[in-house]
Image (cartoon, rainbow, N blue to C red):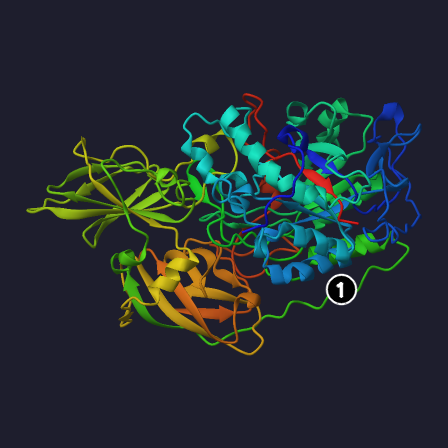
Amino acid sequence: MGSPPRSSPRLSWRRVLCVLFLPFVSSGFAPPAKYRNNFIFERRKLPPNPRRFDWSHLTPRELKNRSQGIQTEERAGRNPYFTLEGHEFLILGGSVHYFRVPRASWRDRLLKLRACGFNTVTTYVPWNLHEPERGTFDFSGNLDLEAFILLAEEVGLWVILRPGPYICSEMDLGGLPSWLLQDPTSQLRTTNRSFVNAVNKYFDHLIPRVALLQALQQRGIGGLLLTADSTEEVMRGHIKGVLASINMKGFKVDSFKHLYKLQRHKPILIMEFWVGWFDTWGIDHRVMGVNEVEKSVSEFIRYGISFNVYMFHGGTNFGFMNGATSFEKHRGVTTSYDYDAVLTEAGDYTAKYFMLRSLFESILVRPLPPVPSPTPKAVYPSLKLSHYLPLWEALPYLQRPVTSNVPINMENLPINNGNGQSFGFVLYEMTICSGGRLHANAQDEAQVFLNETSLGILTDVYRDIDIPPITECQLLRILVENQGRVNFSWKIQNQRKGLIGPVTLDKIPLNWFTIYSLELKTQFFKKLRSARWRPLGGPSSSPAFHLGTLMADSSPQDTFLQLLGWNRGCVFINGRNLGRYWNIGPQEALYLPGSWLQPGTNEIVLFEKEKSGSGVYSTDVRRWAGPGPQVGGAGSAGGRGRVLTASALPESIPGCTLRRKTICRISHSIAYSSRN
């Protein structure tokens, strides 16, 4: 767990809920255009500007003694602009989420960001990962936020920190901890007292950690605040007295009209310039062509607009951190958060990377740092799965089950010091003595068994299933999977998982449930080693754990695991959860960081929900599945399959409304530099 918070006066979350720019490196490109009536986008074509710029002295370590931080200025006859210690500059940001990248790879990704020409790294802070239980904080290992920030300083990057509390980011519940859902009166993302009190306690711990990392003479969060909203919602989402920024997928003059009405005397910052999009299970892989990105970035530079690329490097939704969408149906976000970003999920270069580097190099006096060597990949021998253990035989190795007269949803289970269960699966067992029509509200999907015989599937849409006639009492089992909580829209208020409400058989409520929590944490797999595993003689057709080994050499490297013939489940390597797999695509292989492997034998466990496959194979190529040929042009993701171009992306995120002073879509954030 993380160290105790440093002492500091209580900080109001309302102050720090916004994007705050303190120091990050100045990168001014071509000077902003002149405009009539203070409007930046005069429709005449601007002449090319031959100037080149040198900001090599505007790095965190070169500017240790500062007092101003980020400022905005406006002069007659030109557009407003940002300054850092009196130097005009543009913010060139790229998003890299430390919690989605193995810690051993942080330096590689940041060096590649710097070598591309960016001066700033932007990251969210996931509340749900840092405070998994009330008052228990984790800032260790891959969650060591302070180490990530200091590493960025060492590399020569400034940092924009976006601490939430809500971050969206396609994270489970938008990054909010699931224990907030225990209080039925709480209204998430509003001024509701219960929610605000929880935020205050979290920020009382978080903000003292990051405030000390600002390179200002006066300590504390005191720099430029800003908000981030879609181009259409900025009028409703902004906060008086702070800078408003916008999110967009491509440069269009009309996209700035609402922002201009709101603050014509401030510089423009695009907080999220989307260069791709996320994937959900069962939907084709999405990409944005390199030409589309080049066109927009060229316009940003021409008009002197600061911007942050979302994502520069997407990384991976390791474990169960993925969120979900809920339009026509609930769809979990894939394990891969590749995002068709500038770097791939595994940190590999793309055409977008070299295009951006070329653009940035063309206006800089000094050459950019050399491009780091590509991240090596390995192909290991096929994994040998030698044993399996049916789920029913693994139950004794779980923590003691909960007994209840009525079903209890995941979040309200009396476990984890009263904080309930955040992720994974829940198994409900009850005795029935007759058949009939079973009705249950299972979130998000449930497999129904009579003893060990599968009867079918329940979902949030299909809530009924027939139980065949029986002559004596039998054990009814319902295994429910949390496939990821919705990460935006008002639906986050109703994201409790497991069985919700009563379970009826021919409209008669069932009672006396035995409830097993399957969080599938590392400690469980340590206990499972003493189980009596069965030799694997052929495919199994019920939920089961499958045990095997991966043999690595003396210097393990990154690879991808392809699961041929397997239906759906999750993979664990040396007790670490790589994430979910599902044969409906579009993701065909799981990224396995070499830093998570050890020389020689590595234990691999698959939890397969339905039917085991033919094998697990190592590959050095990432793959996307789809029904047709790939489209999307240069910079598209590798592998086979049909992809969707960014033209299919929404201009603004649907389902985001302002109610009771709701903080909408993108959380307000804090930006700041690194420590003196």
| Secondary-structure class at tag 1 | loop
Direction left: furthest residue: 471
Q: Toward which corner of the image does residue 222 lie, by quadrant?
A: top right
Left or right of 342 on screen, residue 489: left
Q: Which residue is mark 1?
A: 371
Vertical arrangement, residue 143 with respect to residue 88, above or below: below
Q: Please state the horizontal and vertical placement of residue 190, each as a whole percent of the image.
A: 54, 26
- The reply to whether residue 273 is in sight is no
Q: Please state the horizontal and vertical placement of residue 150, each as a whole percent of the image.
A: 71, 53
Q: Please state the horizontal and vertical placement of residue 331, each as a whole percent of the image.
A: 44, 43
Vertical arrangement, residue 193 with respect to residue 634, above or below: above
330 and 548: which is toward the camera: 548
Q: Amino acid at mark 1?
A: Val
Vertical arrangement, residue 333 with respect to residue 184, above or below: below
Vertical arrangement, residue 152 with respect to residue 225, above or below: below
Left or right of 339 on screen, residue 474: left
Left or right of 546 on screen, residue 562: right
166 and 131: which is toward the camera: 131
528 and 7: which is toward the camera: 7
- The reply to whether residue 129 is in sight is yes
Residue at the image position 38 percent from the left and 56 percent from the top = 568
Q: Please state the horizontal and vertical placement of residue 617, each as a whole percent of the image.
A: 45, 70
- What crowding class fits label 1: few (fewer than 14 Cα within 10 Å), some (14-19), or many (20 or more)? some
